[in-house]
Amino acid sequence: MAPRHLLLHKVLPPLSALCLASILPLSALALEWRDNLRAKLDASSRAVHASDLAETGFQHAFGLDMHKVFSGDKGDIGTLILQGYITRINNMQRRPGFFEHPDDTEFVYRIFNFNYTGLGRKLPNIRVGHLEIPYGLEATIPSNGTLRQYQLPRNIGIKADWGFGLNKQHTGFEYDVSLTSGGGQQIERRDGSYVFAARVGTPRDENLSVGVSVYKSELNGLVRERVGVDARYYRGLIGWFAELSAGENAGNDIFNGLLEWNRRNARENTLLYLQLAYFSEAGALRETATQAIAGIKYEPTNSLTLSAQAVTDVDTYRSAESKNTLSVQVRYRF
């Protein structure tokens, strides 16, 4: 019988070669996966004080924000965006419908989809998953996880949903069309629910961009129809935004509008914005409401964002109580 060290001398090289042969493809796969990959852990805490409730609610979120571009020999194949967050609310009386109680914890999908771009320059991209509803200003300005919003929940009732869509950015225009289930955070479709939305506009990276949107949905038994126009104009560090929407809610005429002025500083780490939102609904009587909104976002580092926003009801529907809301948020990405 050969000495043990001679057996090891004979056995170890083949085993080492086998291990190396198995590790190298995994390493190559890992390196390939890391190409065109951006991933951040994202943590935020928000406090919201409502004057009419005389209470302060809190929202804490922690999750992953990942953006990965897949490429082949002939160019990009598609883009995967995964934004999933464990979200905890405490004493949050006014809250999204997927939270059952003022004190609740849910896993929240923000943008969670794959956009297949491999059909060529002329054919559309195909997006599947949890996607943002392509309507108005909200479709052109990233606002997930921020205090600054563009009246989507109050106007069309939903911000993101499970489904699919077609989209493309051409030299002179871009478009985005989607058909989704109406379930919001829930993948399964509610009885009779659906959301159809489409937006066509000029390229969003120009100083002046305009868009036209259409929308129809049935959510919780309420049928909404909208036609909207939106515009953004930048002059230096100052921006002016506008959006108008007209349509119906279950046969009642609707007209909503939003104006925003914003300004960045020279370092572009501070943003100030002022918004004026207008809502009008004509049933038996026409009711109107107006909100004034002021906010600031400050980014002292690439990882840390501090935000504050105040919302004041200038005018409300007859059955609604006027309120003031102050929100502050700390967000850290690492």
Image: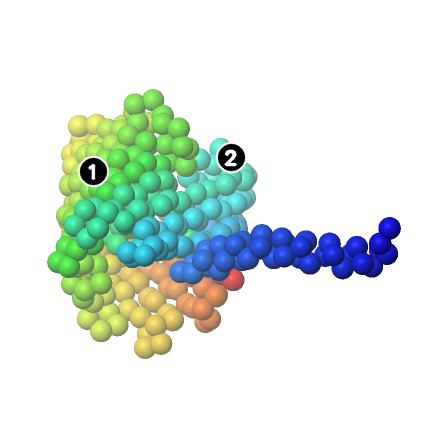
Would you name the residue on which mark 1 appears?
A: 215
Q: Is residue 267 among what the camera can see?
A: yes
Which quarter of the picture shows residue 74?
bottom left
Mark closer to the observer (2, 1): 1
Furthest toward the bottom, the residue is: 266
Q: Nearer the viewer, residue 166 or 15?
A: 15
Picture layout, residue 110 above or below residue 5: above
Picture layout, residue 101 above or below residue 306: above
Q: Position of residue 191 (x, y in %)?
A: 34, 22
Secondary structure, mark 1, is strand
Q: Position of residue 17 (x, y in %)?
A: 63, 57
Secondary structure, mark 2, is loop
- Amino acid type of disc 2? His
Residue at (76% x, 59% y) in the render: 9
| CA distance for labels 2 and 1 | 30 Å
Q: Is residue 320 among what the camera can see?
A: no
Residue at (54% x, 53% y) in the render: 26
Residue at (30% x, 63% y) in the render: 273
Would you name the residue on which mark 2 appears?
A: 101
Graded by Cα atoms within 10 Å as few (under 14), some (14 to 19) or many (20 or more), the crowding at tag 1 reads many
Q: Nearer the viewer, residue 259 or 301?
A: 301
